[in-house]
Image (cartoon, helix red, strand yellow):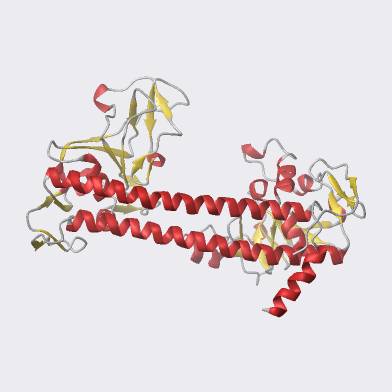
Amino acid sequence: MSISRYEGYKESGLPWLREIPSHWDTIQSRRLFSLRKEKATPNDRQLTASQKHGVIYQDDYMAQEGQRVVQVLIGADLLKHVEPNDFVISMRSFQGGIEWCALRGSISSAYVMLIPAESVHVKFFSYLFKCRPYIQALQSTSNLVRDGQALRYENFTLIDLPVIPYSEQQAIAEFLSHETTKIDALIAEQEHLIELLNEKRQAVISQAVTKGLNHAASMKDSGVEWMGRVPAHWDVGPLKHAFSSVDYGISDSLEASGEVAVLRMGNIGGGKVIMDDFKYVDSVDVGLLLKEGDLLYNRTNSLDLIGKVGLFAGGGHARVTFASYLVRLRTSADCVPGYFGYMLNTVGMLGAARANAIVAIGQCNLNPTRYGALIVAIPPQSEQRDILAFLDEQTSKLDTLVAEAKSAVSLLLERRSALISAAVTGKIDVRDSVVVQMGEAVAE
């Protein structure tokens, strides 16, 4: 594949574009994209614009995300008409660029529709409007975006655009389509690997906390479907027997600074307490300060997050407490906190916890009484320690592999982004590579 610089360059006069090939020019964006103002028609299907999925029909979006979005059932004058190949400025465009739309339908009047001129190759501009330099330029058009102000057509027109021969726009778009498809395939492979490693991690934990490490041990029926048969010498009974105390968190007003760090729902993840993004209070009852080995679980949250447990390992702050949507569990003397951190986050245990949660509109609640009544199997303390040591070793290996795969994804995404930016801003000449790619396709 042949990629090089263009033979000659000149200054574009645009901070986001900098130097451009000598035969390119710049133009006011309003001369390439006009504003669509048509109201929706009764037959228009409602669309949703998102950074993750682009512009797709609302029912498709809800099916993919597994959640409902607000639909306009009355007041059709609140919707605008969209045509295929329009570009949509959404509420998140200042974060991730402008979306190309391949569909006909209607969309919220809060969005802005751009009609491309005949000289615009839509696929080329779908890449340009998503490149990092352009997004940064879009962000610079308003200091109020961070405060919730929507981007408007007036913001868009403040950023001049490159004028490029149509055939060259097409060549760049074909090159990027070919190259990003290959990169996306590599990303998908790494993401699939991450999924398999996480499944392996869960399987290793579930096996250890329900069957133990001695494969020759005598077994008995636990009476609980998700646990099945457990070692005969393990105690089977209510979870509450494993805890010496159960406490609700504080409901005080939280501040950006203070003497005592406060953990919230977002601080529970991956079986651990995540020590960042704190809020604060100036004082708290000493009995509600956390100690190393405390377990916190989400008692009020969405169904997919409720019941998740984090192990507090200390560090970071001398005094740390927790907010009211969390519950602190302190294990009794013969129970090992780290072991319970693993067991309480297994798929089976989380499923049982969520089945016992009280479901309400928008959130669920799992109070300590219901949680404590769940039946678990508890091995002797020495065996808990052995299982904990085994799981620490095994999960550490798997976590390292996951981290390596995530790093590979990050590098591939960075490579993808850099390639797009370089191509659409003229920093590399990819025209000859399109011919090479066509030859490769024929050979394949």
Image point (84%, 47%), residue name: 160
Q: Position of residue 337 (x, y in %)?
A: 22, 40
Image point (49%, 66%), residue name: 63
In this rendering, position of residue 159 left or right of residue 296 = right
* Quadrant location, the N terminus: bottom right
* Quadrant location, the C terminus: bottom right
Above or below, comparing residue 184 to residue 341 in the picture = below
Q: Position of residue 378 (x, y in %)?
A: 14, 49
Q: Is residue 241 visible?
A: no
In this rendering, position of residue 251 left or right of residue 136 = left
Q: Position of residue 209 (x, y in %)?
A: 21, 53
Residue 150 or residue 179, whichever sits in front: 179
Image point (71%, 43%), residue name: 136
Residue 271 or residue 205, whichever sits in front: 205
Which residue in the rendered view is the most extreme toward the right?
23
Above or below, comparing residue 64 to residue 297 in the picture = below
